[in-house]
Image: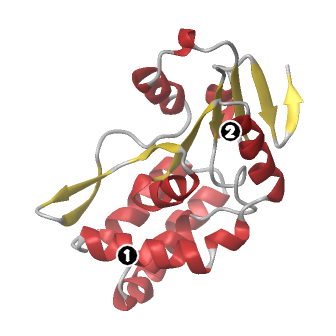
Amino acid sequence: MDLALFDFDGTITTRETFAGFVRAGASRRRRWLGGAALAPHYLGYKLGWLSGEQVRRRVVAVALRGRREDAVRAAAARHLDEVVSAQIRPQARARIDWHRERGDRVVVVTANLDLFVARWCEQQGLECIGSRLESRDGVLTGRYLGRDCCGEEKPRRVREAIALDGYGCVYAYGDTPEDRALLALADRRFYRWREVE
């Protein structure tokens, strides 16, 4: 049996889904006020002054703090069914199917929130390793539980959950520089759907 590790946003999907999921989970008032509050952070990210991790943490703090976790999960499920399901790359779906037909273990490893992506993975019969949010008494605190699952955190979380030496071959698929550390774990690496050394 082999192991296949897939990034989600931009690899499995045709575009980034984090912002859409957050908008779906935020209240109307938070969406309106948050847009203005977060504009400098988005600009800083576009100019290379802030990392994706810094921006995601700030977005979560502004948009989801104080929201009931079950309400955010329900909104994310609707967004997944109504929007994200149409953004799945046919090439990714075919490759995931190929791995499953071979009997491989398939794991999605994403900086996106497991609160959002885990539902899609469950529907597909896949495992999910993603960024986690802190919740107290069913209410989101607006803070991450541990580190954002990006960059070097991706392989760390994979090694924590999976004994890599138990697989004949490890495949990894990604599309951004944040995925390079994940790709480095693999025997066969695919960056933007092209195999690389």
Callout 2 crowding tier (Cα within 10 Å): few <14, some 14–19, many ≥20: some
- What's the amino acid at mark 1? Ala
User: Residue 6: horizontal and vertical position, in percent?
Assistant: 65, 40
| Left or right for 97, reference 130 | right
Residue 63 visible to an observer of this rendering: no
Q: Residue furthest left?
A: 137
User: Residue 88: horizontal and vertical position, in percent?
Assistant: 72, 62
- What's the amino acid at mark 2? Arg
Residue at mark 1: 74
Residue 3 visible to an observer of this rendering: yes
Q: CA distance from mark 1 to mark 2?
A: 28 Å
In this rendering, the label closer to the viewer, 1 or 2:
2
Q: For the point 73% across and 37% down, which residue is it?
A: 101
Q: For the point 70% across and 52% down, which residue is it?
A: 12
Q: Is residue 128 above or below residue 151?
A: below
User: Residue 161: horizontal and vertical position, in percent?
Assistant: 41, 26
User: Residue 141: horizontal and vertical position, in percent?
Assistant: 21, 61
Residue 54 is tagged as none
Q: On the rendered image, what quadrant is the N terminus found in?
A: top right
Residue at mark 2: 100
Q: For the point 58% across and 50% down, which residue is it?
A: 49
Determine which quarter of the picture holds residue 83: bottom right
Q: State the SS at label 1.
A: helix
